[in-house]
Every structure is written in structure tokens, then in C-alpha cells.
Amino acid sequence: MLLRPLIDLLFPPLCHACKGAIPATGAEEPPPQPFICADCLGKITFLTSPLCTRCGAPFATGDGRDHTCGACLSHPPSHTCRSAAVLAGPLQEMIHRFKYGGKMHLADPLGLLAYQRLEQFLDEANPDCVVPVPLHRKRLRQRGYNQSQLIGEVLGKKLRVPQVVGNLRRLRWTEPQTGLDAGDRVTNVKGAFGVRDPKALAGKRVLLVDDVFTTGSTLGACADALRDAEVAAVAAVTVARGLQQ
């Protein structure tokens, strides 16, 4: 499109984080991007090796090799997981506006950011379908949308696989995980998820999607329910990860 550089010059895209203008690249057909300016991207801490090969936790060491962390060796999870970046700075602000401020359009940049940073993990997972972490119907009525489902739509389109909504479901109401310690989080969601139609997912490689990884208890409970439905494998991804102090 020959007019694209001129359009970008006259009406430059705005950064989803700071609202500042993003300079035009000059390319006639620029690649898809999350429209986050270089300054804000520089303030995001992306998660890179060395990581735990199971849960994706980063290691505070100079050794660049990925390996299984002590927690996963002691209690192997039923899934693998990766997160794109640390929950802090501009990314945390975007997720907060997306999740609690009704800014549904932020699903596109957040989902694309996750895809770009986790592309190798996603390729290796080679999922047959995307499954978002479900909200309880009460929470869904309050919020009006499931943020994980919106991110899942973006990832499903990039991966060219369908998103399966409504099969993995919450069986009971759970209190918000915010403010609970790790042990209480596990208890809060234990047995809270189930699969409505196991035959529809049996034998499939599932990509489980959520917005934030905190302790992993919600993803773990969902993965256990999917494993009970005899899926072939569960790989989980989140846009951000809260690092434990």
C-alpha cells in the first residue's frame, strides 16, 4: 500500500501504554506489532533463559541453561508454562486497564506481545486448540467479558487453531486470588474446574491461556481438569508473571 507511509506520517499510531505517538517505520507494509513505543518496551522486563523447563520460573543465576526448578522436581506439574514478561511497569498498567477498566481493545497488543515473545514455546507445543481459563458466570456478568478468552482469540488466530470456549468451566465460585497466600490459593481453586465434554478434548494438545501467572494455582487446577479429560498435553501461556518476593 503506497499510501501507508504517508498515513503513518500524518496519523502516527499511538502507544497503548503511554499514549505517545510511535514514529513511522517507513515500510509500506510494516509487520504486525503490539503498538508499544520503544521507551515503554524498554521498561518491560521480558522473561528469558535461564528458566524452569516446566513452570517457566526465571532463575537468578548467570548460568544460561534452562533446567527444572526444585519445586517442579518435588511436585511435577501436569503442564508446562511460559510467561512473556514480568508483571510490572507499563505492562502491569496495560493489564490492569484491560482487566478492570473495560479496555477490551488492549487484548490485541497484549496477545500479540505474548505471541511474539513466546513464539518458540508455542511452536514446540504445537497445540490443536486454545482453551482460555474460564470465569465464573457471576464474575463474567460483573466484568462483561473474559480477558483470557480475548487474549486466546488473538493467539488462536496467530496459530491458526480454534479456540474452545465453554468446555472447560468453573464448577463453583472462588474468591479472588488477590491477597491470598500460595497455600490458600491452591485450596481456593482445588476442584473448582471441570470439563463438560471430555470426548471433545481427549487426545488433543491444548494451549491453556490466562492473563497473569502469580503462583500458578489457577493454571494448575485447570490443567488437572484437562488431564482428567485425557488430553494429550497441556501447555499454558500468560502475558505476564508476578515474581514472588
Image (cartoon, helix red, strand yellow):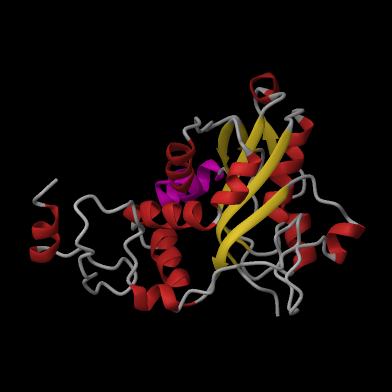
Q: Residue at x 27, y 54 (%)?
A: 30
Residue 170 image-quadrant placement: top right
x and y percentages locating residue 207 in the rendered image: 61, 40
Q: Residue furthest right?
A: 74
Query: Who's the residue at 36% across and 57% down the image?
Result: 106
Q: Decide whether residue 136 is among the magenta residues.
A: yes
Q: Is residue 237 magenta?
A: no
Q: Nearer the viewer, residue 73 or 193?
A: 73
Q: Quadrant of residue 176?
A: bottom right
Q: Main secondary structure of the magenta part?
A: helix
Numbered range of the magenta stretch: 135-150
Does any portion of residue 224 appear in the rendered image? Answer: yes
Q: Is residue 192 visible?
A: no
Residue under the image location 57 percent in, 47 percent down: 209
216 shown above or below 21: above
Q: Is residue 97 left or right of residue 4?
A: right
- List x then y, in percent, for residue 2: 10, 49
Q: Relative to residue 49, is residue 38 drawn left or right?
A: left
Residue 224 in the image, given as x and y percentages of width and height: 77, 41
